[in-house]
Amino acid sequence: MKHLVIIGTVFPEPNSTAAGSRMLQLISFFRSKDYRVTFLCAASPTEHSADLKSMHVDTIAVKLNDSSFEMLLRQLNPDTVLFDRFTTEEQFGWKVAEVAPQAVRILDTEDLHFLRKGREEAFKQDIECGLSLLTGDIFKREMASILRCDLSLIISEFEMELLTKTFKTDSQLLHYLPLFAENSKISPDYGVRCNFISIGNFLHEPNWQTVLRIKKIWNEIRRQIPAAEVHIYGAYVPQKAMQLHNEREGFLVKGRATEVKEVFSKARVLLAPIPFGAGIKGKLLDAMSLGLPNVTTTVGAEAMHRSMPWGGYIADSDAELIEKSVFIYQNASAWNAARDNGYRIIGEMFNKDLFLSDFSARLIQISENLSDLRAKNYMGQILKHHQFQSTKYMGKWIEEKNRGTLN
């Protein structure tokens, strides 16, 4: 039985973040291929963390900058190591390369952090997001991590194109594997649904900015549809978000949604005027798979529908967001067409059966040709060398400092 070791920044919370759902999808895939799976994490699980034991996954707490990690890794003797984001690879990658050189090293990018950060800076400065904003320190760190790994999982077709065409990354180091979704067989019809809904983990800045945008346009939507409410859901609600709650205006901050399917099945329209971000938006996938039309922005729908009609409307200006939100809420035929468009997008772009056999074949190909593939990855070799010289000795210095052996 092959052994996958996952090194996670946090324990996955599938009801809080798309990243949590993504991790469970990856675990499910490797378990289906009869891998033994061990999840290592320096953070503690929370009450909202997934029950990994029920998925037959072993969990082990690890310490940062501690030699016990190397001892543990030798005992585990993995065939494959998966890093849940580039910062995890920075912290542990050199140790994995040193202790378990035979293991295939995979980076799950989740989304490209440098793209998200560049767009956030552009949003703050109210300018276009050009290359100068994309290629800062996070870009250099994330690209170095991608080049050091044997394979990086890319969640968005746009990001695949950005990496291969703009930044000339070798496609042999990348594999497109989106978030998966499956269409619900039972979805309440237009007439029994009511109200608008928004959802998103408040620890994620684009989600907070999305709520502020909804607040900005809500009074005009409410003026045109006086009976409508907007229900704002999301994990880790800060006080500043609770202060937006206003029952008289129908702007209701609900907090964490225990069951996304339940609240989405009652709502008529998802409002998602996402101002910046990257990757695939889990809320939009969930909405379309559950037959819930949405109104989002160009960046929200990015890489999610190719040339297919969208599962709702795409709008960027306040006026257009208001117009489309009111129209689809009040127009049953437009609503039904949007729902069908969403189902088509899910079926043709995000069904796991479209991707898993290719992913499985790619893993076999890499494991059988690992030495040759690494030998051809010249930049990866150079970056691994420099990582060993810098990160390794900094980590060892911290270990000694923690032991109290340094003055």
Image (cartoon, rainbow, N blue to C red):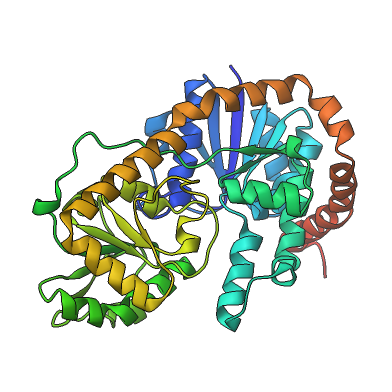
Report the side of 271 relative to 158 (left or right). left
Residue 264 appears in the figure: yes
Q: Quadrant of residue 240?
A: bottom left
Of 113 and 292, the residue lying toward us? 292
Residue 238 percent location from the top left of the image: 36, 75
Report the side of 285 relative to 196 (left or right). right
Residue 93 percent location from the top left of the image: 73, 45
**Quadrant the N terminus occupies:** top right
Above-or-below relation of 121 to 53: below
Above-or-below relation of 16 to 107: below
Q: Residue at x 68, y 43 (%)?
A: 69
Residue 94 appears in the figure: no
Q: Quadrant of residue 252?
A: bottom left
Report the side of 361 relative to 249 (left or right). right
Of 234 and 75, the residue lying toward us? 234
Q: Residue at x 45, y 54 (%)?
A: 281
Of 228 and 211, the residue lying toward us? 228
Residue 293 percent location from the top left of the image: 28, 53
